Image (cartoon, rainbow, N blue to C red):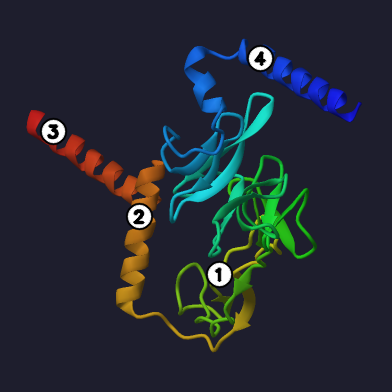
Amino acid sequence: MQLRLLSLCLIIVNILEYIESQHVPRGRRHRRMHPNVSQNCAGGCATCSDYNGCMTCKPRLFFALVRNGMKQVGVCLPSCPNGYYGIRSPGISECKRCKADCETCFHKSFCTKCKGGFYLHTGKCLDTCPVGFENNNHSMECNTIVDCTVSDWSPWGPCTKRGKTCGFKRGNETRTREILQHPSARGTLCPHTSETRKCIVQKKKCSERVKGKDEAKKNKQRKKEGDVPRKQRQKKQERAQRGEGKQREIRV
């Protein structure tokens, strides 16, 4: 009875193998009979299978499982593709898949680039950056928030009035400071970099040279505005009257 059952099982197995072989191209039937033979394998494979692709790789190559349609097949690569990281060992070098939100990584727990919509921060991919950091939509990383930094105030400048340092008692003096570090997008804005206050000095007369310069500036400004000084107008009128008197005397 046991022999009959064993014979029946062998017959069924042979029938199933025959049916499956009819659905495979002729060129591949011979290889399916030798699933672990290294002959005619894809480049880089040491051993392969028609069903599973590469099974072992040549030295220094990484073994990786990649999707091919509805199944995963083995391939041998010189470096791991995006979404994978490499692990070398004496027996086999493998490509392991990164986390789902990582585009590239060099370890399962450390991403080097995140997929769209995530920000990279200390090897992790986050929806939004933690406190003290701000989202950088250009690099898709979390950058430290930078506040504005300014220098100390300069000494107060000389007391002046309308650009002069003489001829007055009350004027204004100014001091300034420089921006050393501009703020980031969410950093503290820079304060004002100059301030002015009133000042009192001992009044002193301006030299003739200074007065002459001031007068020349005033005349230049008046000419631009089309305002001729009253004295100049009077002189022109006097010259005109003298000219008319001479012409009358000549006619007589």
Residue 247's mark?
3
Q: Position of residue 46 (x, y in %)?
A: 46, 45
Q: Which amino acid does label 3 sit on?
A: Gln
Q: In which quarter of the image is the C terminus?
A: top left
Q: What residue type is labelled 2?
A: Asn
Question: Which of the two marks, 1 or 3, is nearer to us in this view?
Answer: 1
211 or 172, which lies in front?
A: 172
* Residue, disc 1: 179
Mark 4 residue crowding within 10 angstroms, few (<14) / some (14–19) / many (20+): few
Rendered position, 171 above or below 239: below
Is 174 left or right of 197, judged from the image as shown?
left
Q: Which amino acid does label 1 sit on?
A: Ile
Q: What residue type is labelled 4?
A: Tyr
Is residue 195 visible in this depiction of the protein? no
137 or 251, which lies in front?
A: 137
Tell me which label, 2 or 1, sits earlier in the chain.
1
